[in-house]
Image (spheres, grey):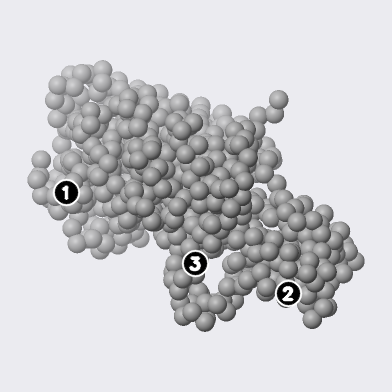
Amino acid sequence: MTSYGHALREGFAYLLKNHPETFTIGQGLWSPWYVGNSMTDLDKEFGQARVIDTPVSELATTGVAVGAALSGKRPIVIHPRVDFFLLAVDQLVNQAAKWRHMFGGQVDVPVVVRAIINRGGEQGAQHSQALHSWFAHIPGLRVVMPSTPADARDLLIASSLGNDPVLFIDDRWLYDLDAELPPVNPRLRLTDVKPRVDVVGTDITLVACSYSAQLCRQAAEELRQHGISAEVVDLRVINPLDCSVAVSSVRKTGRLLAVDGDWSTCGLAGEIIASVAERMPLSGFKAAPRRLTLPDAPAPTSKPLEQAYYFKSSDITAAVLQILGRK
Amino acid sequence: MNSDAFRLGPLADPSQCHGPVDLGDTAPTQLLAWLRKLIEIRCAEEKIGDEFGKAVIKCPCHLVIGQEAPAVGVAAHIRKGDRVFGAHRSHAHFLSLGGSLQHLLAEVLGKDTGCSRGMGGSMHLLDRANNFFGSVPIVGATIPIATGAALAAKMDGVGSVAVSYLGDGATEEGVFHESLNFASVFKLPAIYVVENNLFSSHLHISLRQPFDSACRYAVAHGVAWQRVDGNDTVAMARAAGVAISAARTGGGPQLIEAVTYRWRGHVGHREDSDVGVLRKEGHKEWKKRDPISRLAVAMIAAGYISEMQIASIWTEFRSAVETAWLQACADPYPPSGALLDRVYFQEARP
């Protein structure tokens, strides 16, 4: 069995070993604790020339990676927290995401920015954010949010070996999730990665990504105890957003709960509901679609407030019971 | 050279540096090539200004008239494998490296034959075949990108360099300082060419910074620096040669401050001496520091060229620009599919 954190490390090791044009750069890469167990000792195995720790300069470091990507390299930038990555947004949103289009398709920018959601533990408002919906808004920027160890490894590899800029967001609450990993498929392309039905069901469709998808899988187990058959769709990639699998599922179940560990307004959950609603007749819905998201407030530090802030699988279960009129 | 890293001194005084430039021992053929390139750039920019004034060209154009020399001096030392990045005012950077007049004019018209396939306009120029790796108008954005190209060059170990052109306004962006620090720590072959024309948009540097020279930032970050009369093509080429060869051979990052002046407004065709804060003062004097006439007069005095030959170069390039313009006007716009087909990489279809 391999944990999500170790699977990420396997992804890095695979890239560094097999693709000399890859390197990784960011704050804390020579430290044992900055990024959990996801990059331990990579610098010792592959050398500090390709596993580069940096000054406290998020914007320059990200720009450096974009420049290296324009120069034949495949860099992966590490931002140990999404919150700090905000200092570097220009380089991903204004630059990397736009260079292909605004230079007439003549430029590849194969850069991966890996930003980590690192919440809980009373860390508060500036150490806890996800913000993936912001970035999924940007044409030209692929946004990848794996929820399983195999996806953590394989989508990291596919992100780095593609030709577009990718924001790869992983959640530390997933790092201890274990799974058997198949061998790496060296030909996997990000464009081939479609949403996946993780749990087959007939009564309701739960759509999510990243840690929320894991909570949905747990909720589906809980719902089984209530005699409810929930189908779980893991989006895996949220930009470009492919809602076809979710649409097929809702056509079957007639009910939709979009679950997202981010805020509601202009967020992914609302986008899922809109995208599904646009593609099927209203008569196909047996109940109004709903979303479960974080409350519209910054993350708190105080323990009881924090417990109220983050939803759990039991909250998903409760929402489903309500949609089905069972509560 | 003035050793004060904080102050430009006489170079900021518009009544100075009007005379012919010192040609040194530069070969006449080299001087002629530079003079021709300066004139080509000037002719292209005057044409773009004229057509912008008539609203035939609509995209924002930041004309380089008056400050053509830094690009020509730097381009003299760029070789295959080097990567050069510009900013909003980059027509001269593009043309100096060998970019085609027609590709530039087609681009500002949004035509499919433009250097960026009509998708970029004046502010997004690209010409990889001639080492120009891109220009963008977000101030300071290409500074870390060029730094990353320098990191890639260092990894490749073949002596290539990266050049970042920026203005004095961009030295007020935090990323400039982050990048210089980064390049210094990692000893990267990056050359930062600060074209200090004393104005950021309408605002004089004295209203934006406590000192007027960017060289002090190089000192702070442990970067080698030179300050040059940026309207002296020969001095510019000499400084670029020193900096680039140092960077190629492991000397680490370099900063060149080219003190210059743009004749037109921040954007558009007008001479906006009336809108700029402090811009009115010295405008006429600054124009006497014309890089083209100062080189031409020196070459005539040295007996390298006649006035008549220079006149015929102007005629030649005005005509070349007209020919390129007519072609660009006749060229097609991008196909409608360009709107969506270039957002993501498209797999080649078998």
Q: Mark 1 to mark 3: distance in Å?
A: 41 Å
Tell me which residue sits at (61%, 43%) in the image.
A181
- Tell me the residue that label 1 is attached to: B219
Q: Mark 3 to mark 2: distance in Å?
A: 23 Å
Badge number at residue A119: 3
Tell me which residue sits at (50%, 74%) in the image.
A299
User: Which chain is home to disc 1?
Assistant: B
- In front of the other: label 1 or label 2? 2
Name the quadrant of the N terminus of chain B: top left
Q: Count residues near mark 3 (Cα–Cα under 10 Å), then give few for <14, some for 14-19, many for 20+.
A: many
The amino acid on which the numbered mark 3 sits, given as a three-letter code, is Arg
Badge number at residue A319: 2
Residue B134: % across, % down:
44, 39
The amino acid on which the numbered mark 1 sits, given as a three-letter code, is Val
The amino acid on which the numbered mark 2 sits, given as a three-letter code, is Ala
Count how many numbered circles sit on residues in the image. 3
Residue A148: % across, % down:
61, 52
The reply to whether label 3 and label 2 mark residues of one chain is yes
Residue B335: % across, % down:
67, 37
Which of A30 and B108 lies nearest the eye of the viewer?
A: A30
Q: Is residue B148 left or right of residue B182?
A: right
Q: Count residues near mark 2 (Cα–Cα under 10 Å), then give few for <14, some for 14-19, many for 20+.
A: some
- In front of the other: label 1 or label 3? 3
Tell me which residue sits at (60%, 61%) in the image.
A211
Element class at badge 3: loop
